[in-house]
Amino acid sequence: LTSSATQSSVGNLLEVDLEASFDQVSIAGQKAKLLSYNGQIPGPRLEAKPGDTIRINFTNKLSQPTNLHYHGLHIPPTGNADNVFLKIQPGESFTYEFTLPKNHPSGTFWYHPHLHGLVAEQLFGGLAGLLIVRGELDEIPEIQAAEEQFLVLKDFALNGNQANFQGHMGIMLGREGELLTVNGELNPNFSIPKGGLLRLRILNASTSRFYRLKLEEHPLYLIATDGGSISEPVELSEVLLTPGERVEILVRGEREPGQYRLLNLPYDRTGGMGGGMMGRGMMGGGRMGGGMRGNRSNTNTPQTLATFSYKNSVETLPLPKQLIAVPELPEPQETRRFTLNHGMAPGMGMVFLINGEPFEMGNPDTVVKLNTVEDWEIANTGTMDHPFHLHTNDFQVISRDNKPEPYRAWKDTTLVKRGEVVRIRIPFKDYPGKTVYHCHILDHEDLGMMATIDMK
Ligand code: C2O
Ligand code: CU
Ligand code: CU
């Protein structure tokens, strides 16, 4: 028999069957035909610990090819691990298997399809799930004592009771849906323990929609970003979460019992093209005006995502003072510059570009050395915002338009606003192989704003 010591030194095996299908599921209080993993929206939440091995027996019941990507995990980008170049045909099965390094950070990660050309549509149809790594952060006493909730933010568009894969806003701006769901529900209820702490783990799993989050009358104490813990809680009045990003937040039960809304505040990510030209122009203005307009893009009025109400709590909890230190990275050995923009290509219409080139399968665009540190200057010279995402290795944002970032954090996705230059610092660690970096507005990624990196 295996002793528990042996077990913990090699980690546990977590085995899951995952099936992608296009079928009836529950969404926003009704039944509709959507894309889902195991018939659930969001897909099943997977939980593991550093050192564990995850085996996913995946079956593709869709009518198109697909694959899986483990967004934010530090695991090999090759073989049957986090390999975005695999193609799993309709009707085929594939076994993914990888081991989380023993020093893998604890945090909120996720999985979703990543087959170039179909990513936006498959995500918009419903495919996405959380992948939680529990470790050091979860052992901090104040955090352990907090109540925990997961919030998967995802917008949907329906045509009758079937997915409308286009949504509004259009492919160019990035499709959005009018149903703003949290864990597949419209305006769900959560409770805040009076006097206690509530830990919210929030994922933006939308294809294109940004969320500017505010909880009425409650400051948000940020404790973790994409790649895990920050050094100490940071008090914020609101948080902007772009597609692919995650935050973990503590809420203190310090107000009068009552109801408080989690709001999505107005934010313009398209330089006026979203609410104006595309919205009114394409929808004809009248038919869906008034009440619906607020849901079609968040450039006008706040939208309610969820409602929080108080319940009694037995103990009063303080905020943690220290979390897990985020080290300062050494100076880079190499600095590169990338520009993000779009343009017209003959016969293709609008294409989205990195350094003037659309994504092409084949030769790597960037070759980096393992065990080195690089700075990447990402310049958005276009007219829309682009959240920039890198696979396999996390980075820290150093500055935005030369303004130093206010606190250190591990990130895998960060917003580069139109006209902005963001400097990120990346330690390329141990895993060799090819993977990608791209805009996480997945329509932009599918339309070319992606490139290949080779780490050797
Ligand atoms: Cu969340 Cu390359 O993706
Ligand atoms: Cu990713
Ligand atoms: Cu983009």
Image (spheres, grey):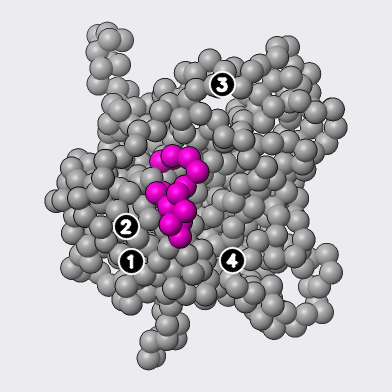
Q: Are marks 4 and 1 in contact (CB under 8 Å)?
A: no
First in sequence: mark 3 or mark 2? 3
Residue bearing the label numbered 2: 376
| Label placed on residue 269 | 4
Q: Do the residues labelled 1 and 2 touch (CB within 8 Å)?
A: yes
Judge: label 2 CB < 8 Å from ligand 1: no
Q: Residues within 10 Å of mark 3 (few under 14, many from 20)?
A: some
Residue at 57% x, 41% y is 202
Mark 3 to mark 1 CA distance (whole Å): 38 Å
First in sequence: mark 4 or mark 1? 4
Percent of width and height locating residue 301: 77, 61
Quadrant in the rendering for residue 34: bottom right
First in sequence: mark 1 or mark 2? 1
First in sequence: mark 3 or mark 1? 3
Mark 3 to mark 4 CA distance (whole Å): 34 Å
Mark 3 to mark 2 CA distance (whole Å): 33 Å
- Say whether residue 323 is magenta: no
First in sequence: mark 3 or mark 4? 4
Determine whether, in the image, residue 211 is placed left or right of residue 311. left
Q: Is mark 2 on a helix, strand or loop?
A: strand
Q: What element carries label 1?
A: strand
Tell me the kind of residue under disc 2.
Trp
Q: From the viewer's perspective, is residue 271 above or below residue 123? A: below
| Label placed on residue 320 | 3
Report the magenta residues as a range.
Answer: 397-410
Q: How crowded is mark 2: few (under 14 residues within 10 Å), some or many (20 or more)?
A: many
Tell me the kind of residue under disc 1.
Phe
The quadrant in which the N terminus is found is top left
Residue at 51% x, 63% y is 417
Mark 4 to mark 2 CA distance (whole Å): 23 Å
